[in-house]
Image (spheres, rainbow, N blue to C red):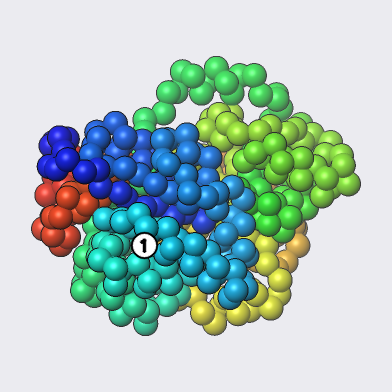
């Protein structure tokens, strides 16, 4: 693949990520750009992973989702952020804008940058197929190309006139070091069954779901006294918050760790996880998972009116059927979650069938390297190549996809 500059001036690619998940998705693309395309300069509003990958940081917006849905509830905050970005771009020309997920925050920014001649390549397609298919016209107008992380999205968007390509998923692109994970898992708590509790990457998710997860484990332990649980916080602050929300003391049998989700998944028999990309971490290792997302009763009722998709947890969405339990969105108590866990744990045949189905979900993503493909697309777009489906197809082919 071509890596030499086609001109003397470096081309800027602006990344905007508003959530920890967006920070994680963008970082590998930035690292690939730095390694393979010296004529491209990645600059970013985002989080620590993007900074570590080598982006020139213009602001921190993704450390804890503070610039995401919750942070952008005030119109004044939205406009102030967008004004800062536009002012910077006016003085520092940008060839490509790569907004990462968070459509409610990113699309209004696209609307202001695109008229300036900035090409827009979205990393993570908006989930219009789940909740807002009527907004497809806005996507056609404001996006030059969508890099889709879910296998079925390419056809969904292309059939509606959007330039789009399935590029793989960063969670599934990098092979696991199974020997290393086994060693790390061997140092985690003993007990059986082993339950992994994943309360989310944002503090708002931890606040909503900590007690629900802890209570669900207590139900499991009541029937299985030797059960042990491991809470994996996305950072030290969220790990401490989980404990503090339970009165400063973790329930008996619950242990705490910071980071190391892959080792936790390798260790566990079953995960109870706040809905999100982490369910694919479980699918990659074929570990049964129960998805939860605590909301108010009003929010849960509203979601039923808005959401079109029959499933909301990623493994179920990819499979096209319910292969693992999901409580998303959910306004009830812990009892149904605990009982769903016990039904799995007490049924060896069902556990094995679930593991087999999760293997199939992971396999459906193939071996596409989302970082390599994403970097190649934005580099070629920054150099002036036309963004169309043929170009995206050729990039994937050249990257071995």
Residue 44, compared with residue 73, is above or below; it is above
Query: At 15% from the left edge and 35% from the top edge, which residue is drawn?
Result: 4
Please say whether residue 107 is visible from this viewpoint. no
Query: At 15% from the left edge and 55% from the top edge, which residue is drawn?
Result: 384
**For the view shown, which residue lies furthest in the front direction?**
91
In the rendering, at what x and y percent does residue 351 appear? 53, 42
In the rendering, at what x and y percent does residue 296 appear? 71, 71
Query: Considering the numbered disc 1 on the image, is that residue within a helix, a strand or a loop?
Result: helix
In the rendering, at what x and y percent does residue 99 appear? 39, 58
Residue placed under numbered mark 1 in the picture: 90
Indicate the quadrant containing the C terminus: top left, top right, bottom left or bottom right.
top left
Q: Nearer the viewer, residue 132 or 284?
A: 132
- Residue 156 is left or right of residue 322, and the answer is left
Q: Nearer the viewer, residue 222 or 113?
A: 113
In the rendering, at what x and y percent does residue 165 appear? 24, 57
Q: Which quadrant of the figure has residue 128?
A: bottom left
- Residue 138 is left or right of residue 307, and the answer is left
Query: At 21% from the left edge and 43% from the top edge, which residue is drawn?
Result: 9
Indicate the quadrant containing the N terminus: top left, top right, bottom left or bottom right.
top left
Query: At 24% from the left edge and 75% from the top edge, which residue is drawn?
Result: 160
Q: How many marks?
A: 1
Q: Nearer the viewer, residue 294 or 77?
A: 77
- Residue 393 is left or right of residue 254, and the answer is left
């Amino acid at each position: 693949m071509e890596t030499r500059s086609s001109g003397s001036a470096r081309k800027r690619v602006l990344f905007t990520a508003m959530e920890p998940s967006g920070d994680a998705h963008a970082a590998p693309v930035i690292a690939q750009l730095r390694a393979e395309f010296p004529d491209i300069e990645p600059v970013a509003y985002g989080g620590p992973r993007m900074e570590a990958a080598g982006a020139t940081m213009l602001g921190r917006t993704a450390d804890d989702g503070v610039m995401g849905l919750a942070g952008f509830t005030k119109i004044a905050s939205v406009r102030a952020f967008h004004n800062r970005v536009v002012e910077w771009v006016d003085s520092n020309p940008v060839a490509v804008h790569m907004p990462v997920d968070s459509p409610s925050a990113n699309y209004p920014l696209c609307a202001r940058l695109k008229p300036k001649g900035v090409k827009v390549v979205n990393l993570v397609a908006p989930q219009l197929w789940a909740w807002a298919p009527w907004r497809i016209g806005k996507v056609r107008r404001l996006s030059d190309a969508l890099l889709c992380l879910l296998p079925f999205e390419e056809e969904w968007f292309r059939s509606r006139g959007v330039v789009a390509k399935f590029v793989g998923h960063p969670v599934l692109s990098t092979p696991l070091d199974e020997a290393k994970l086994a060693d790390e898992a061997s140092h985690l708590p003993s007990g059986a069954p082993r339950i992994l509790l994943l309360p989310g990457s944002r503090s708002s998710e931890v606040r909503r779901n900590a007690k629900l997860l802890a209570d669900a484990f207590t139900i499991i332990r009541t029937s299985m006294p030797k059960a042990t649980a491991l809470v994996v916080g996305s950072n030290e602050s969220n790990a401490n918050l989980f404990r503090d929300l339970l009165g400063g003391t973790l329930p008996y049998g619950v242990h705490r760790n910071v980071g190391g989700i892959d080792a936790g998944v390798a260790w566990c028999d079953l995960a109870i996880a706040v809905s999100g990309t982490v369910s694919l971490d479980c699918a990659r290792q074929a570990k049964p998972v129960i998805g939860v997302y605590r909301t108010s009763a009003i929010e849960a009722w509203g979601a039923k009116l808005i959401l079109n998709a029959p499933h909301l947890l990623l493994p179920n969405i990819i499979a096209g059927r319910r292969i693992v339990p999901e409580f998303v969105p959910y306004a009830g108590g812990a009892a149904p979650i605990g009982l769903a866990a016990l039904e799995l744990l007490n049924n060896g045949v069902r556990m094995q069938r679930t593991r087999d189905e999760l293997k199939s979900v992971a396999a459906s993503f193939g071996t596409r390297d989302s970082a390599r493909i994403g970097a190649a697309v934005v580099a070629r777009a920054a150099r002036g190549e036309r963004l169309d489906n043929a170009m995206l197809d050729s990039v994937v082919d050249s990257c071995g996809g």
